[in-house]
Amino acid sequence: MSRIDDAFRRMRAERRTGLVTYVTAGDPSLARTADILRQIDAAGADVLEVGVPFSDPLADGPVIQRATERALAGGATLAGVLDMLAGVRKDLHAPIVVFSYANPILRMGLDAFVARARGAGVDGVLTLDVPPEESGEWRGRFQAAGIDTIFLLSPTTTVERIRRAATLGSGFLYGISRLGVTGARDTVADSAEALATRVRRETAMPLALGFGVSRPEHVRAIGQWADAAVVGSALVNVIAEHGAKAGLLDEVERYVRWLRS
Amino acid sequence: MSTNWFGRRDPDSRGYFGEFGGRFVPETLVAPIDALEREYMDARRDAAFGADLDRLLRHYVGRPTPLWEAARLGASCGARVFLKREDLTHTGAHKINNALGQALLAKRMGKTRIVAETGAGQHGVASATACALLGLECVVYMGSEDMRRQALNVFRMRLLGARVEGVDSGSRTLKDAINEAMRDWVARPDDTHYLLGSALGPHPYPLMVREFQSVIGREARQQCVEQAGRLPDAVIACVGGGSNAIGIFDAFIDDPSVRLIGVEAGGEAITPGRHAARFAGGAAGILQGTRTRVLQDANGNIEPTHSISAGLDYAAVGPEHAYLASTGRAEYHYATDVDALRGFQELARLEGIIPALESAHAIAYVRRAAEQWAPGAVLLVNLSGRGDKDVQTVEGLLQEADRVAN
């Protein structure tokens, strides 16, 4: 039973909507990211997604693109992110999911990455540009190390491929509730419910829905259809606004608690 | 023509040429790309589709393009040099061959909107042209640095009714334009086709673009046999993403006596950030949907690139080129900015032809490697585009060189 399985079992037992948070590691610095993760964890986030900055984030919208640029300018690398996680893991309750594009992992080498991720206490890996069909050599290694392989589902994903992701993946499924790149929106898309309904018909695997989530009412709405809501760009925005200020951690905590209200 | 232009050398069912290729895309694009693959595989077996494309290539593009024996250029390097005149196509570069093929395919799929990326602007112009002809909406993403370098082509695209969107992220060149085009496509996969301009990206693009460009090699092979009486000793083409090169190589891959030579952009020097020679400084990686050779740093971030020519200024190479290099079937060299500038001027003075700065890299290589050609060697060079778009840039560079010299 992985730490991720455990987290979702607890949400279901407590009959509440879980909160999955995404932050770009290294924005404003890796040391600050470690502090932010501690704060978010203490504020009750259920799963911590940690984004690895990459020079060409083609699935991301402007908010995460800018965060990525700041992180890279500050010298954040995949190796640095894993070192930071190794240091902070013992302070965190929630499972950690590393969220990355393929190339930094490939460059480190799959075996080296798996060894270091396991050493850092990473619980799951989501590689944005490695769909199930390309995931063979990745998945096998993650599985052997006890690391969950998280797949994305989108409004365009066919029923056949929903089944494939549920069979090949583990931990949870991450549903992209709308078309387009990452970014906060004012409302939850109608496509969120439609996707959740299609997924639910195929699998009982835990489902987190994201893309566009920024307010507590979004989290509550998603709770009607899925196990958890993912908040990404909106949280990255809070960090961007307060990154250099002394009150950053308080703002982050206040925002996460508000989302859970 | 339409009966034999497809299916000669398909990648495996997952789109791999050896260990290169594949489909590394965000989940939202998997379904539209699956649909594109099905439609393309269907279309290329459809005689009516082939006939439509043939008609456009002949009567609209002006194919077959001539093969010109450049006797004065040849004499200057001790070989017979034949230029495949893709610069004489409608719109002035080989890009139109692929743009029309994909635009026809988009119509067949019921798409109403095209997005495209462009570096030098030639693919953007070709896409805008195909869209005007076929009544499709067209949005072209172009790095703001490239818009500055290729201002003439920006205006041409706008005249043709396309919307040109400047891209200010990253290095503001071709790579960033591709990122932005993919972001657009992720948001509107239902009504939009992404008209990728080179033999890059996720399967089936590298295959499809090669097959649409393979008309170059088929014509050139026959023309070379007619004019030189035999196959060439070497086929030489510049390689950015590599569509003009793979298009002309394709007809000769099964002829072991024919050397296939790709010429990359050596830029200012083979040090990080100052060139775009993936075979000189790259490593295996995944970028923009495909596993190939990529210029990257030790942490897997993509390195900035530099070339005098916007069309070669790109950090990855088409996966089939990576494969052909790995098997040794093709070889890859580079020409520097200075070489290309010299090639540009020499072709103008020796043959009365002003080449695109991209194509000037291939010309420069033929000249620089002159000592290796056996007397009477037959060299087939793909003159992939014309140089009108580069005249202002070159004028500026030559004036600057004069200033420095004085």
Image (cartoon, coloured by chain):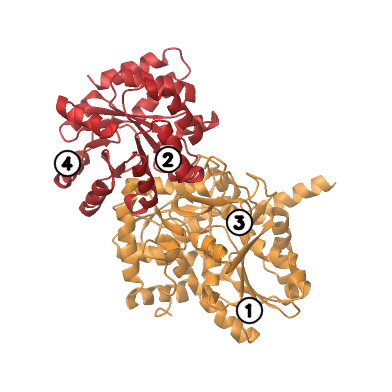
Chain colours: A red, B orange
Q: Is residue A171 above or below residue B102?
A: above
Q: Is residue B264 or residue B213 the one in the foreground?
A: B264
Q: Are marks 4 and 3 on the same chain?
A: no
SS under mark 2: helix
The CA span between labels 1 and 2 is 50 Å
Q: Which residue is mark 2?
A: A114
Q: Is residue A251 or residue B22 the one in the foreground?
A: B22
Residue B91's spot in the image, x, y percent? 52, 64
Asked whether the beta carbons under mark 1 and mark 3 sit within 8 Å of each other, the answer is: no
Residue A237's spot in the image, x, y percent? 39, 26
Q: Is residue B272 above or below residue B8?
A: above
Q: Nearer the viewer, mark 3 or mark 2?
A: 2
Q: Is residue B26 above or below residue B65?
A: above
Q: Which residue is mark 1?
A: B232
SS under mark 4: loop
Q: Is residue B250 or residue A18 the one in the foreground?
A: A18
Residue B229's spot in the image, x, y percent? 63, 87
The residue positioned farthest toward the right in the image shown: B406
Q: Which residue is mark 3?
A: B279
Q: Check disc 1: other Cα within 10 Å, few if <14, some if 14-19, many if 20+.
A: many
Q: Amino acid at mark 4?
A: Ala
Q: Are marks 4 and 2 on the same chain?
A: yes
Q: Which residue is mark 4?
A: A204
Q: Quadrant of the N terminus of chain A?
A: top left
Q: Amino acid at mark 1?
A: Pro
Please give the chain letter of the residue carrying mark 1. B
Q: Nearer the viewer, mark 4 or mark 2?
A: 2
